[in-house]
Image (spheres, coloured by chain):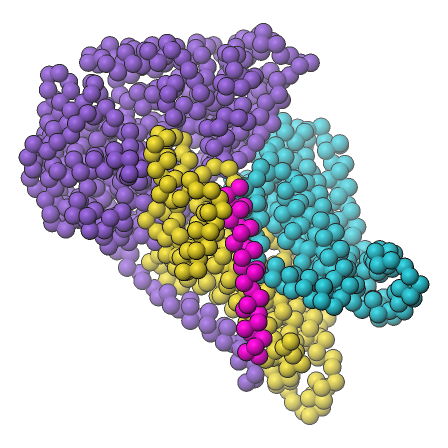
Amino acid sequence: MSSLRYLPLLVLLSLATISGCTDRSAVTANTLQRAIPTDPETLDQHKARTTQAADILRDVSEGLVSYSPDGELVPAATTSWDLADDGLTYTFHLREDAKWSNGDPVIAEHFVAGVERLIDPETAAFYAEFLSDVSNIEAADDLTLVLTLRRPTPYLLSLLTHPATFPIHTPSLAEHGDGFARPGKFVSNGAYVLDAWVPGSVVSLRRNEHYWNNAATSIDKVNYHILVQDSSELNRYRTGELQITSTVPPDNFAQVQAELADELHVSTYLGVYYYGFNLSRPPFKDNPELRQALSMAIDREQLTTKVTGRGEAPAYSWVPPGANNYEPPALSYSGMTQAERNRVARNLYKAAGYGEDNPLQIELRYNTSDTQRRVAVAIQSMWKETLGVETTLVNEEFQVLLANIRQGDITQVFRSSWIGDYDDAHAFLKILESDNPANSPGYESEEFDSLMQRAAIQTDLDSRRLYLEEAERVMLADHPAIPIYFYVSKHLVSPEIEGWGDNVLDYHYSQHLSFKAAQ
Amino acid sequence: MLRYTLLRIVGAIPTLLLVIVLAFLMVHAAPGGPFDDERALPPEIEANIAAAYHLDEPLPKQLLRYMGGLLQGDLGPSYRYRDYSVNELIGVGFPYSLRIGASAMALALLVGVGAGTIAALRQGTLLDRVVMGFSMIGISIPVLVVAPVLVLLLAVKLHWLPAGWSETGGLRHYLLPVITLALPQIAYIARLTRASMIDVLSRDFIRTAYAQGLGTATVVRVHALKPAMLPVLSYMGPAIAAILTGSVVVEEIFGIPGLGQFFIGGALNRDYTLVLGIVVFYATLIIALNLLVDILYGVIDPRVRYR
Amino acid sequence: MSGNRTIKVTGTLLLLITVMALVGPWINPNDYMTMDLDRILRSPSAAGMHWFGTDGLGRDLFVRTMHGIRVTMLVAIVASLVSLVIGVAYGAIAGFVGGRVDAVMMRLVDTLYALPFIFFVILLMVAFERNFLLIFVAIGAINWLDMARIVRGQTLSLREREFVEAARLTGVSAARIIFRHIAPNLMGIVIVYVTLTIPQAILVESFLSFLGLGVQEPQTSLGALVDAGVNQMERAAFTLLIPATLLAAILMCFNFLGDGLRDYFDARHSQ
């Protein structure tokens, strides 16, 4: 027996490691458990780029304005603001009682420092150009912030709800440098403070005792669980380990709809799912008829009801419905039945020189994911059936697809999407301006560009809107891309939770939520 | 033996170098950079980011820079987790992977050796067939089927166990991942043990022991178990590799923040340094473990001589 | 089961599955890529000849499953052959040449054992565009080490046998000796290990499918079907049960077959 000590040793060793993790069941009743699909890459508001980081930052930090649960703009770190008659100068009156999580007062200078760091090329912020409409920002005094615009920017307040525009605690930045947003160091001014972050697992927040509206915060702790697999979210929701999910897996949607209808929240969302054409290469270069044929042959109703099936809206425009003060024009054929569209599509396809003996052969690139795969397979089949197009599906890593789209050397048709950073049609239309780095198809239209420029200088909201709508109409007629559907946000929200509101930006501040009083 | 150990350690260095260079080249050969996004960046900002991470330097220079860092034990900054260094991330992830990996291995050894021994002692009986039948099933059903099915049954439907891992949860949260990971290994080890135990039990010295009037339990424990363990011990190398592979699936399904999950996330997001760091870390670890197994082998079987 | 019976039973089963996979698509009118959005996730039935039901896009699962078996078997067998070719050549050379060369070559194998291969496979799949060839090579590259070790051991002992000695004395070239005299005598052990490598390759393929790194749509494999089935198991259990059962059956058959073949060759060897 004695010489066999080694095997039990191994066993003991591992038992020791397992028992090292004691049951820290500190889950108090007042802890909110919600999910995000990936880690935030950082909680430094200027280096962050994902919606996950922004979601958490909206809980721990606060800007000048914010959204109510229903998506209405409300004052946050301000009590009020004035807009000068020229439409170019905003004056914000900050709250006297606004405090950082270490008790320091929040002053106008912190907002100025934040914006300066945002636009400093050294920072290399992802949203560096986010405030390019702002020509100057200055602190008139500790509680007065003056913001001057280059041109009328009706969506400015919407921009100011984005964490990239939030104030920065300058003493921490001076002390810690770029690592200032790590747990234990991060001084923030929102309803919550960062408590802990275990990469790959959980970001934990706790109540900020110094927050000016702390009395209105109901939930003491918030855990954002990082769950890569959407099926894990659903499983954990059903076992009660989560109270709010970030999505619902496509394969389980019908079941969830049937069994958990009262807890399911589906809401339109400012995001468009599209297939882009590479306009710099054949066969799509200078070939709008062919592009239109492919666009028309996609049966969006079937696609959204049968293939994606989570309440997505079929897209016949570029800007999603619901954008502030905007009525998107529709693609010319949106009024036809699918049978009529197919007939026109076949004629256009033939006119472009293709047919049964000479089918179009293209590659469709999409990134690895269940939804992308299903949509691509369905569209491949629709193109095949209606037009006889021979499509080869190429499934790539997201980063590979992005690199290929940008280089534009091998792509033909590719899957992409755009999520609005602020509630305005401009957030969607600007990316198709010929010099925009996010212009994935490489769309270049003088007419479109000049309409966009004219829209930009309008002070009157209605004439601005007309220019934007005209620009979209021009763009849609050129078919640089196929809008396929508009995203919806999908969450399961436990019946214990109160204060949840559906909104187009899909912002759900934890400070607005509470647990129903225990009966 | 000290000399042998030292020689083996020196011999491992070229392997590690090979691993680093291969992994480095493969990661950099992949199209797409760590900072690509649908929200394309202005060129000036992009250049600044690339410069901050030395991505603008020629590849050989980047490799040298990386090696230089390695010599000081520095695996570099993560690109995806911009506030963390790779050392920190491995420090976070490895304890989780180790815990579930080592526990699964321990469970596999306990149950596998136990079941294999019992099957060998009852060779040809119904019990033997049941054990071997189950072990064949264990080998033949992939983890990626077992894990979700167990979650659905035991967690979602029966509410016996939690569906996923949790930072604040206790031992209960480890049960499903560890069992899932151990199942195929239990099966392999049971089969190995059974075969080698049958072989050992037929040897003369065992008959002698029985003839001395010793009970079955004593014979097995004192005389048979040790020689019968040798094939199981040589299987430890492949077993560690299998557990590593399995842990990627298990971590992904149960949401455990281990190295497997970091690796997949890192590879998909082009987090060059994180991916490289994990490969280097695991290669070092496996080399060390293999060395340990070789030495253990010698301790258990004195016939093995160190060259 | 005695060794011989195991070989017969599992061999027959594998043959049946293979024949079914090859002939199945011919006797069913559906094809593997036509979708029908009005028949999504239909249970198996004779209606529409959907014997295994339909998938999430209304494609026929019988034909897709047969297609998946073909792809899985192809991947597994070719990958195993890749490992076979590398492993046998490497092992035979090391064992036959012997001495210092052997020591160096085997040390290399020992060190390669230390590589976390699965991580390299993932890197390989991520770094390059996915295609069959890459999957073969990636999986084959994992498995050749065992083969090299075993073949080298056998070659070492064969080298000392009289007929090799005789050939060498009569001036036959080394290459000729390896191919004419040594290789044929390695057949038994090689067949056994190829049989046992195939299930490993199948598992790796299903692992890659789980990560979304497997074959391109509309192609499919048993691994990809199982992965899809896992997601749909509550809504349509058959989408998991059918491919998972087939996958398990194939793995089990190969494992049993390998064991049986080993017993068979061992028995012949000791006679």
Looking at the image, is A261 positioned above or below residue C196?
Answer: above
Asked whether B24 falls inside the magenta stretch, the response is yes
Start and end of the magenta stretch? B1-29
> What percent of the width, then of the height, locates residue A22?
35, 66
- Horizontally, is B196 left or right of A256 in the view? right
Q: Quadrant of residue A43?
A: top left
Provide the major secondary structure of the magenta segment: helix
Given residues B149 and A80, the one toward you in this image is: A80
Q: How many numbered tags mark residues here?
A: 0
- Horizontally, is A192 left or right of C22 in the view? left
Answer yes or no: is residue B172 visible.
no
> What percent of the width, then of the height, locates residue A136?
17, 27
Given residues B83 and A246, the one toward you in this image is: B83
Q: Which chain is assigned yellow?
A: B
- What is chain C's hue in the picture? cyan
Residue at image point 71% right, 75% down: B198
Residue at image point 58% right, 66% down: B11
- Horizontally, is B221 left or right of B279 in the view? right
> What percent of the width, then of the height, locates residue A497?
27, 43
Looking at the image, is C200 positioned above or below residue A516?
Answer: below
Which residue ends up furthest to the right in the rendered image?
Answer: C170
> What percent of the width, then of the height, locates residue C60?
64, 32
Which residue ends up furthest to the bottom in the rendered image?
Answer: B212
Looking at the image, is A473 positioned above or below residue A120?
Answer: above
Residue at image point 69% right, 73% down: B196
Task: Quadrant for the N terminus of chain A, please.
Answer: bottom right
Q: Which chain is assigned purple?
A: A
